[in-house]
Amino acid sequence: MAADNPRGAMFRVIVPNQHSRVTNAELFFDLVFVFAVTQVSHTLLHHFTPLGAVHVTVLFLAVWWVWVYTAWVTNWLNPELTPVRILLFSMMLGGLVLSTTIPTAFEGRGVWFAIAYATMQVGRTAFWLFATPRHRTAVRHNAIRILTWLSISAVLWIVGGLSEGETRLWLWIAAVAWEYVSPAARFWVPKLGFSSVEAWAVEGGHMAERCSLFVIIALGEAVVVNGATFADLEWTAANILAFVSALVGSIAMWWVYFHKGAEAGSERISKSTESGRLARLAYTYLHMPIIAGIILTAVSDELVLKHPTGHSDIRTIVSTIGGPLVFLIGTILFKHAIRGFL
């Protein structure tokens, strides 16, 4: 029973040699990020300039970070319990606000993007701290460390949202950099010091499955966009060839990621004595370029579908080469981290 769980009443019950399943509440929560990925992709498509690419990169890094932090927390907490479900559903509201403001985050709705993001990050971490029993001192200290770092970045996000132009951009870059360096810095804070490896222990199979599902989300968004774009085109030989090429590209990325790599990662992290360290590197950091590569490739597919013949512009060239390249670099580094070889 949850009440008898030594980890805490709201924490998952860990059974030795048994994989914690991904719950329906988590899958439902992920639907918001299907929309978020689509918004990131479309924003890049319509603002494919050097400055636009920087803007979209900042927004994408925020979307990935809020999702992966939630994956960590639901690895520890039990989403089958009502309080944790309410947390996830509340974050869905925040995620919808976050997603709807992505196209205009550097224009009129920046403050709403910032408020939604900061509320999700700080609120979720505060809930985790509240749910952790007092006898689990190491875990509580870990939550306090993370809450401290996220509270500082929340100020940067909101002040940036209230600012305009380059000031907003630089404040948000600082906020993203602060958050991305925090796990590598082991969330050091005065008096509490660094977080320990033991405090980061996760149920490896669950973490691996959660991140592989986000890969499916990104690939699914690409397939949907390709299908919707093709549906509005004439069925000429060039358009059909472009459509088939886009689908083959998505299948190839699925194959490269899931063939051996995903299962090997799940097995490796499940058996690791330092599951938290491996989850931080392989699933928190290295999955980011994998997802980014898929999104950039989806932009390329849409551009090629709309203009399958003639000279390619700089947007098409950059996305067609850059998307698969970023994806492959991320996948190679991920597989190296979990297996030590390709």
Image (cartoon, grey):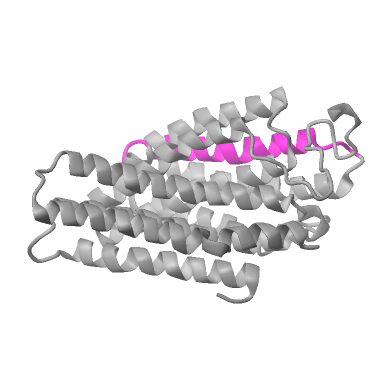
Give the x, y percent position of residue 182.
64, 58
Give the x, y percent position of residue 328.
44, 68
Can residue 5 be seen here?
A: yes
Query: In the image, what residue occupies the spot 36% across and 55% down?
Result: 250
Q: Is residue 171 magenta?
A: no
Tell me the magenta residue range: 106-134
Left or right? Give the position of 50 relative to 291.
left
Give the x, y percent position of residue 273.
81, 62
Q: In terms of image quadrants, where is residue 143?
A: top right
Q: Is residue 27 above or below residue 275?
A: above
Give the x, y percent position of residue 123.
64, 35
Q: Is residue 177 above or below residue 14?
A: below
In the image as oriented, which residue stretches furthest toward the bottom?
Answer: 341
Prevailing secondary structure class for the magenta stretch in the rendered image:
helix
Q: Along the line of sight, which residue is nearer the eye, 268 or 108?
A: 268
Q: Is residue 129 magenta?
A: yes
State which quarter of the image contains the N terminus.
top right
Q: In terms of image quadrants, where is residue 342?
A: bottom right
